[in-house]
Image (cartoon, rainbow, N blue to C red):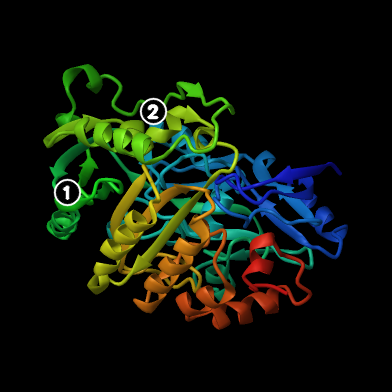
Amino acid sequence: MPNTSLRGWGRTAPTRAHVVPVRSAADVTAALASAGPRGVIARGLGRSYGDPAQNAGGTVLDMTGLDRIHSVDADSGRVVVDAGVSLDTLMRAALPFGLWLPVLPGTRQVTVGGAIGADIHGKAHHVVGSFGNHVESLDLVTADGRAHTLTPSDDLFWATVGGMGLTGIVVRAVLVLHHVETAYFTVDTEQIDNLDELMARQSVDDEKYAETVSWFDAVTTGDHAGRGLLMRANHATLDELPPKLRAHPLRFDAPQLLTVPDVFPPGLLNRFTGKLFSELWYRKSPTKLGAIQNITQFLHPLDVLGEWNRGYGPRGFLQYQFVVPLERGDVVRGVLDRMHAAGQVSALNVLKRFGEGNRAPLSFPRPGWTLCVDIPVNDGLGPLCDELDELVLDAGGRHYLAKESRTTPEAIRRGYPRLDEWRKVRDAADPTGVFTSDMSRRLELTS
């Protein structure tokens, strides 16, 4: 077995593991039988930002070869897929049938298994919830090598949804997709002058839109601090498309234009370049109602750039994401103020209101404000994040495990009050602790 260096999308904290390619459930069972004392974790396309798909000195199962789409039912919307199928591949297969995956995160380069393990969310969370809400059943290989078909009536199902791969290996799932007339959106964009106004506007008329999100400027200070773009959209009907698009309304228009080379030095994103980027991004999208945009333009603009994370240089970056209750929106302002005071720069900043959560004990979304910032790794980042952690946790918030790379076991215990409930189900399914990762050891989720 090759010994391979692995790291998350943030390009921090690489470790080495034995990587085993998987093409069938039988391959999973065989790998579990030969696993050493450092255990096993599954890995898809490596889009978790920290270390949940790393296992230093242990075994990592490369699930991307388990990539068959078994069936697509255009009438019911049900699709049967292997866990290594990417959301990009699934969308390309489903759209010709007029089917749309209801939960799409900021990239399509995520596997179905990873989407279940992280219980991913998207801009439509306030309407459709997170990924686990649309899983009708899943096949899980547990530590004893046996496969189990689980449904939402099973506690182990909900421990697996959001469980970061620590209950077993998902090998197949049945998903329920939504019907659409076109592959396009009608998009309303508002250019808003400051953070308070941005949050106030996002709190109005959310229910009228299928997808909502805000980008905000985390560099500008003073009266215009937190200015941003509020972008809200609904799926376009055939009648809403311009004539040139009606001939192929379900066309999957999602090119990758280039791959970013690994040549960028550390420190490229600083206050000067961050301010320049923020000014250009803010000015490029004036207020406009009813624009027609494709899947890449509205949902996945970064997918046109392969390996875009290289732009942060060799030290990588931290994506800091949290959610706080709706009544504690002041924490968003507090985080922005502390970033300014510490001289930290982030160009890619997202703010959204979550809807209701689901039954999964470790699922991240809950009703509230979620904020996400990307900060280049630097010597002053750790103390700032420790300060932000306390601000978030004191407000009753929590951090997203799929983005997390440096917080403490205590922070996770405070943020996830159902952690012990999850542990009880997990330990029953894996009493000897076969499934483990760098993250699970660091956060004391597993022994």
Residue 46 in the image: above or below residue 370: above
Q: Nearer the viewer, residue 165 or 178?
A: 165
In terms of image quadrants, where is residue 410? Answer: bottom right
Q: Nearer the viewer, residue 420 or 64?
A: 420
Q: Residue at x 46, y 60 (%)?
A: 132
The tally of labels here is 2
Residue 214: image location, x then y, percent: 26, 48
- Is residue 286 in view from this perspective? yes
In terms of image quadrants, where is residue 313? Answer: top right
Residue 324: image location, x then y, percent: 33, 69
Badge 1 or badge 2: first in the primary sequence: 1
Q: Residues within 10 Å of mark 2 (few under 14, many from 20)?
A: many
Query: Image check: 265 left or right of 438?
Result: left
Q: Residue at x 58, y 52 (%)?
A: 113
Q: Residues within 10 Å of mark 1 (few under 14, many from 20)?
A: some
Secondary structure state at the residue bearing disc 1? helix
Query: Image check: 389 left or right of 251?
Result: right
Label number found at residue 186: none
Secondary structure state at the residue bearing disc 2? loop
Alpha carbon separation for disc pair 1 and 2: 38 Å
Q: Please name which of the two marks, 1 or 2, marks the residue nearer to the observer.
A: 1
Query: Image check: 386 left or right of 75?
Result: right
Q: What residue did someone put label 2 on?
A: 252
Dot 1 amino acid type: His
Q: What residue did someone put label 1 on?
A: 224
Q: Residue at x 62, y 46 (%)?
A: 44
Dot 2 amino acid type: Phe
Residue 5: image location, x then y, percent: 74, 44
Residue 253: image location, x then y, percent: 37, 25
Q: Residue at x 78, y 46 (%)?
A: 19
Q: Nearer the viewer, residue 51 or 128?
A: 51
